[in-house]
Image (cartoon, helix red, strand yellow):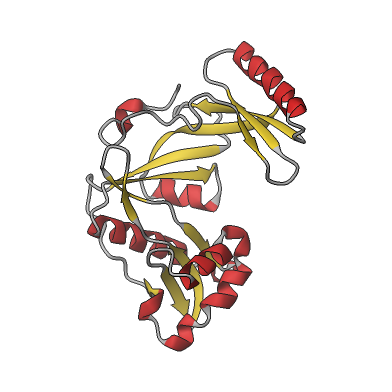
Amino acid sequence: MFFRWDWLRPVLTAPIMPTLGIPTLTRRGRGTVKVFAYGIGNGVVEGAAELAAKLASVHDAASARVVRPLGPDSTHPRGTRVQLKDFTAAPCPAPDGPVRPITDWLTAVQETFAPFAKDMAADGLAFLHTQMQAGRCGPVLAAAVEDRIVGAIGPMEVRPDAAGCPQLMPQYFAVLPEARGQGLGRVLWRAAMHWGQSCGAAYQLLQTEVDGPSDRLCQSEGLTSLGFSHSTRA
């Protein structure tokens, strides 16, 4: 395992091991088998690939993949980056900008969330909207420009981890393409971090696609990179 356990020890009882080494089968679509390869050397990956292919055949899954953790100092980072936001390290001041909980906006502005969520369904906002309507999630922060919601992050929820330490849960996060480049994503993210710290969260763990917009934002905001999870076809 290549993640820096010493960074996680204050807040977790065990290192990040997504499946504890157990192969997983996802029935979404035509089915995918994933085998996590922990260790050094090509033999580890080759063995995991052979097992993934065998299991995919046995369970009639269309895809077989090998997932391999890479260390935070990897010379070729790729896949998904695991990042740590430590709320005990420094204050998270409230940012200036047109961001507030959706329920604090005027009704006419709140009503623009539905079309925004539909436009950003690929980022999970349509699902989030469904949860909001059913009253099944925490607050959602929204950015509005000219009385129209153009960005949102949520739900905002703090829950205890296995050790009882309060963690800010990951959120859905999106800004309309035509509203990007104005700093609204950063304002939304900082507002979420301010909310989490104000509500007693000790930390947040995030997974971001390497070199994607959220990854670049988190890196520029000083989050600690704990390592990477790289997936390849078996």
Q: How many marks?
A: 0
From where the camera sits, is residue 183 visible?
Answer: no
Q: Position of residue 124 (x, y in %)?
A: 56, 60
In the rendered view, tell whether residue 211 sits above or below residue 75: below
Q: Position of residue 177 (x, y in %)?
A: 60, 67
In the rendered view, tell whether residue 124 sits above or below residue 146: above
State left or right for residue 126 relative to residue 8.
right
User: Residue 225, located in which quarter of the rendered image?
Assistant: top left
Q: Residue at x 47, y 84 (%)?
A: 109
Q: Residue at x 73, y 21 (%)?
A: 54
Q: Residue at x 56, y 29 (%)?
A: 76
Q: Nearer the viewer, residue 100 or 50?
A: 50
Q: Position of residue 130 (x, y in %)?
A: 53, 68
State left or right for residue 144 relative to residue 193.
right
From where the camera sits, is residue 216 visible?
Answer: yes
Q: Position of residue 205 (x, y in %)?
A: 39, 43
Q: Nearer the viewer, residue 62 or 74?
A: 62
Q: Nearer the viewer, residue 79 or 112?
A: 112
User: Residue 100, located in which quarter of the rendered image?
Assistant: bottom left
Quarter in which the N terminus is drawn: top left
State left or right for residue 70 relative to residue 162.
right
State left or right for residue 123 relative to residue 84.
right
Quarter in which the C terminus is drawn: top right
